[in-house]
Image: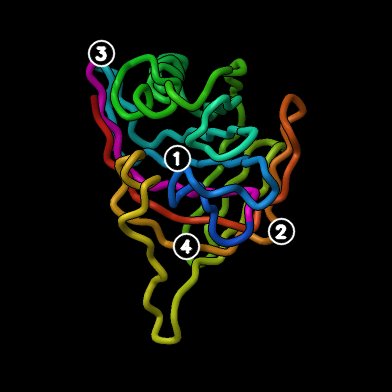
């Protein structure tokens, strides 16, 4: 059951800047419902003897209200460049089947997991981070900084604590879109960038 992954992630939300669900269960999403997506760029990782370094996973989910109220539907996209063994371990970790944060958090807010898909998951960094998943998702983030170039960061939010992330760098995601045929299609204006280090 033991696993450990660390790296960087992009986040996209259907709300305007910023997603109110990060701030706790008492806040209502802009449109009443919430849809979000993450792109996980795993720099280092291992699960029961399988090396997970240099792999990528995307996750999307939608909820009828605030994330914390649950009853969500989710899907994982496992990068096609990963081996079958790596994809098996990644699906188990991110689907909450191997304990840790994913089981604790997503086990409480996701009521239906759609079948995972093998897809081309591309994540780019630099000044304008990007996430692309086949023809399903096209995400471009413009990180927010002040006039001196300091990153606009959020710390101490309830959602960050739940996901065991110390802080997030806010980003504008205007023009980004997610369109899985089995889920609601949505545009995303709200984005963030984070680092993660998770284990179980």
Q: Where is residue 179 in the image (x, y as percent from the top left)?
A: 74, 38
Query: Can residue 80 be seen at all in this image of the molecule?
Result: no
In the image, residue 170 above or below residue 186: below
For marks 4 and 1 on the same chain, the one whose residue lies earlier in the sequence: 1
Tell me how many marks there are: 4
Q: Nearer the viewer, mark 4 or mark 3?
A: 4
Residue for point 60% across, 15% down: 115
Is residue 149 in the magenta section? no
Disc 2: which residue:
175
Spatial separation of the CA atoms under disc 2 and disc 4: 16 Å
Q: Which mark is residue 121?
A: none
Q: What stretch is highlighted in magenta?
A: 1-15
Disc 1: which residue:
40
Q: In which quarter of the image is the N terminus?
A: top left
Q: Nearer the viewer, mark 2 or mark 4?
A: 4
In the image, residue 126 above or below residue 20: below
Disc 4: which residue:
170
């Amino acid at each position: 059951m033991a696993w450990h992954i660390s790296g960087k992630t992009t986040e996209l939300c259907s709300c305007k800047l910023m997603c109110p669900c990060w701030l706790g269960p008492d806040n209502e999403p802009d449109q009443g419902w919430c849809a979000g997506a993450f792109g996980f760029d795993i720099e280092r990782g291992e699960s029961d003897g399988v090396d997970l370094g240099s792999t990528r996973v995307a996750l999307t989910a939608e909820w009828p209200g605030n994330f914390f109220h649950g009853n969500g539907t989710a899907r994982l996209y496992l990068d096609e460049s990963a081996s079958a063994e790596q994809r098996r371990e990644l699906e188990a970790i991110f689907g909450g089947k191997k304990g840790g944060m994913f089981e604790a958090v997503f086990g409480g807010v996701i009521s239906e997991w759609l079948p995972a898909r093998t897809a081309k998951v591309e994540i780019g960094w630099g000044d304008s981070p990007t996430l692309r998943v086949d023809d399903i998702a096209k995400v471009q983030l413009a990180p927010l900084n002040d006039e001196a170039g300091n990153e606009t960061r959020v710390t101490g939010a309830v959602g960050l604590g739940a996901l065991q992330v110390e802080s997030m760098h806010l980003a504008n995601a205007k023009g980004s879109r997610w369109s899985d045929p089995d889920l609601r299609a949505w545009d995303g204006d709200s984005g963030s960038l984070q680092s993660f280090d998770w284990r179980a």
